[in-house]
Image (tube, coloured by chain):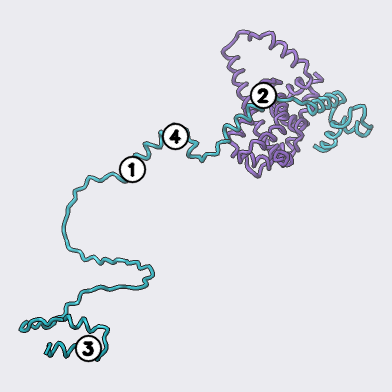
Chain colours: A purple, B cyan
Amino acid sequence: MFFRKHINKTDEELMILVKNRDHQAFSIIYNRYADRLNAFFFRMLWSDRAMSEDFVHDLFSKIINKPELYNESFEVKPWLFRIASNMCKNAYRKRSFEEAYKEAYIHEEPITTQQELMIDELILTDQIHKLLDQMGEERKMIFLLRYQQELPINVIADMLDLSEGTVKSRLFYTREKIKTSIKY
Amino acid sequence: MKDFEKIEKLLKSKSYSELSSDERSLIESELTQEVYEELRQAITQVQREKLQVNKSLKKSLMKEFKETNNSRLPVIFRWKIPALTHIIPLVVIVYLAFFMPKNERVITQDRIVEIMVRDTVQINQVDTLYLERIVKVPTPVYVTREPKQTTSPEKIQTVNRSLSDQKEVLDLVVRGLE
């Protein structure tokens, strides 16, 4: 009965309960967003399933350990995806450092296992992965936030500290980029 | 960015073959047919895609949540031992700083001080107050005469007798047995 009452609550009401150590509220928030966040991380982080689940775990772990980060004035969905976007930005930064290091110091061919080769093959046949891979980090993020998570343009603009016009033009530019890549 | 909303709406709802001639001309002002189809495919697939998280992940997170938050003890009791090890020396330092006897020379000097002392006496509903005291009153003592015999055997007999009987007894005593 208590659980049913929680189900009818908004995300914002639930997050206030999470701040007050209510584990049922946390469970509902998790059920509402875990799969969505997993899909976002999966496409943002090179279609790596294990990595995306690790990131989902880390994000919710942050909420558990620092619930005070949530401010009552925030909308929960954009707040969660803002955290997710920042985590992705850090992952890209880390990856670029690793690649730069490999280029500079390791000249040997990377050794790949059979399983890794199979995953690579799957990724190559994944049409969406190909399309998203052509986009840069920020454009991919905007594309996924807009079409996968269906966030409004103004919310995406606010999340990424961009103007609405810039968000629209970057989505448009995405199309242009795809158009160019298909042509050549 | 004019017609952004219109193009987006078409991308989400119609394939290229379903577009009317007006809609096609609008799309072609921005994109080619191929790009339109590619984008539409990407958007619909991304929207349909549902990636379920492993169930064990929720279990571990719920466990973490309960471990972190379920303790109903006040904050002070939730401190781990290392925190107390920091506090104990702090308490000792505070004690030493404020309560340790200072190494000062004590000089004593006697002087008479008048102190008014007030006592409070509580009386619980006094009903009868008995005052006992000894009053010394000077009384004359006759030492030249022998002390008079207070009671005589005859007097004892007068008790409970009529006046006439008493007179006879007195006469008998005064006159004797004549």
Dot 1: what SS?
A: helix
Front-lying residue, A150 or B63: B63
Residue at x-position 67% and y-position 20% = A50
Residue B85 against residue B52 in the figure, above or below = below
Q: Do the numbered discs 2 and 4 sit on residues whose CB atoms are within 8 Å?
A: no
Q: Are marks 3 and 2 in contact (CB under 8 Å)?
A: no
Could you tell me how far apart the alpha carbons at marks 1 and 2 are, in whole angstroms? 52 Å
Q: Label 2: state its secondary structure.
A: helix
Disc on res. A71: none
Number of the label disc, if any, that sits on residue B166 = 3
Residue A81 visible (yes or no) = no
Residue type at tag 4: Ala
According to the image, label 4 marks what residue? B83
Q: Are marks 4 and 3 on the same chain?
A: yes
Say the numbered circle drawn on residue B95: 1
Q: Given this view, does label 4 or label 3 mark the residue nearer the observer?
A: 3
Which residue is located at x 68 percent, y 23 percent? Answer: A45
Ranked by sequence position, the earlier of labels 1 and 2 is 2
Name the residue type under label 2: Ser
Picture coordinates of residue B150, whole percent (x, y)? 16, 81
Earlier residue among tags 4 and 3: 4
Mark closer to the observer (3, 1): 3
Q: Counting residues from the N terminus, which is met first, the one under dot 2 or under dot 4?
A: 2
Alpha carbon of mark 3 to alpha carbon of mark 2: how far?
A: 130 Å
For disc 4, the chain is B
Does label 2 lie on the same chain as label 1? yes
Q: Chain of mark 1?
A: B
Question: Can residue A174 be seen at all in this image of the molecule?
Answer: yes
Q: Position of residue B96 (x, y in %)?
A: 31, 42
For marks 4 and 3, give the CA distance.
111 Å
Q: Which quadrant of the structure image shows residue A42?
A: top right
Q: Which residue is mark 2?
A: B56
